Amino acid sequence: MARGGLAERPARRAPLHLDRRQGSQPDARDPAVHLHRAARAVPPSVDRDEPAGRPRDDESCIEAAGAGVVNRRLVGYLCAVGAGATWGTTGPLSTGLYAYMPATSIGFWRVLLGTVCLAIWGLVFRRDLLRVDAHGWLLVGLGGGILVALFEIAYQLAIAGAGVAGAAALLYTAPVIVAVLARVILREALTPVRLALALVVMIGVALTVTHGSNAGAEAARLGIGAGIAGGLLSALSYALTTLLARFAVPRYGAVRVLFLEALGGVVILGIVLPLARHAPPPLPPTAAAWRGLLGLTVGSVLAANILFFSAVKRIEAAPAAVAATIEPVVGTLLALALFAQRLTALGWLGLLLVVGGVAAGYLKEGAPEPTA
């Protein structure tokens, strides 16, 4: 018989902590041990009263992941806009070079200098720049080099046949081509909004470049048929370069892809131009020509392409191509400021269409990545 009525009380459990006097350990089979450990594993915010509206840890992680996707896409779109803006300086910088060498030679030398700069950078900072598998050499080095050379030659053919304005208008059919081919080749989403934005910026570019005071500059020397063919080929090469970058940059890195494409382009241009009786000069003829070529190399070859490749690593090809159409806007504004050129009312309308299309794309593509 128990004393003092202790038999009527429930038995008291031993404390869960270590009994220092006896050196005993809590019994792992005791359910109280499991409850105690589970309680310690639960974040304090679950056991305590939380302020109203405060998200829990799992909800915070989900929101943070979503914000990361949005920020990644916004950075990608801004990189594409930055690439287009940098490409927009090409026209003003090239204007002063036409007095020293033909456009095909300018294209060859800027790509060559870009290749040399990347090679030096690789030797100093990144010795593995040439460590690429055979598939990379074939696809990026050869395929990308062909596209670079095709663009340089086709765009000059477009200028000779359709003039500067016509060539630029034909070139910027590229966003529509990119949107369609990205769906076919890369299985990216082709939404009505993306297609509409590509059409809007294409129309805007056409109005901008054909309704300025310099629209008739560089009178056509070939037939209009040759100009249209060259313009569409340049647009196709630009579009395919975009799709190639979208595939290759996540695998090989932006700088390596740019180096391989430039290297392949220089080799092909070095073979094709002499055969076409347009051999570039052994060296730029004057110090002014060197300065202009270095400016083009740093801007339109290195900075612009690295920005654009960084963009297609983060966003799809179609919105990247739309964002890069800010190029003729920047070029036109620089021409207005530096060369006292003018725009007609339709030219200003086209400029606004491009800016509006790029801005709408910025707002649209800030959303999480769409599914195909």
Image: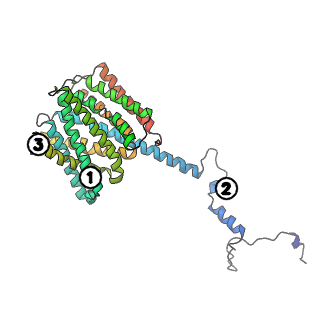
On the image, the x and y values in percent for residue 255 come to: 29, 51
**Which residue matches tag 1?**
138
Element on which disc 3 rests: helix
* Mark 3 or mark 1, earlier in chain: 1
Q: Can residue 163 be seen in this view?
A: no
Type of the residue with mark 3: Leu
Q: Is residue 37 left or right of residue 361?
A: right
On the image, the x and y values in percent for residue 5 come to: 90, 72
Type of the residue with mark 1: Leu
Marks counted in the figure total: 3
Q: Are marks 3 and 1 in contact (CB under 8 Å)?
A: no
**Which residue matches tag 3?**
275
Label 3 neighbour load within 10 Å: few <14, some 14-19, many 20+: few
Give me the disc on residue 47. 2
Tag in front: 3 or 2: 3
- Quadrant housing the N terminus: bottom right
Decide: is 177 above or below 34.
above
Type of the residue with mark 2: Asp
Of 184 and 231, which appears nearest the observer?
184
Element on which disc 1 rests: helix
Tag in front: 1 or 2: 1
Residue found at x 28% / y 35%? 235
* Mark 1 or mark 2, earlier in chain: 2
On the image, the x and y values in percent for residue 114 come to: 21, 47
> Real-space Cα distance between discs 3 and 1?
24 Å
Q: Is residue 157 visible?
A: yes
Task: Tell me the quarter of the picture where residue 108 sits.
Answer: top left
> Real-space Cα distance between discs 3 and 2?
79 Å
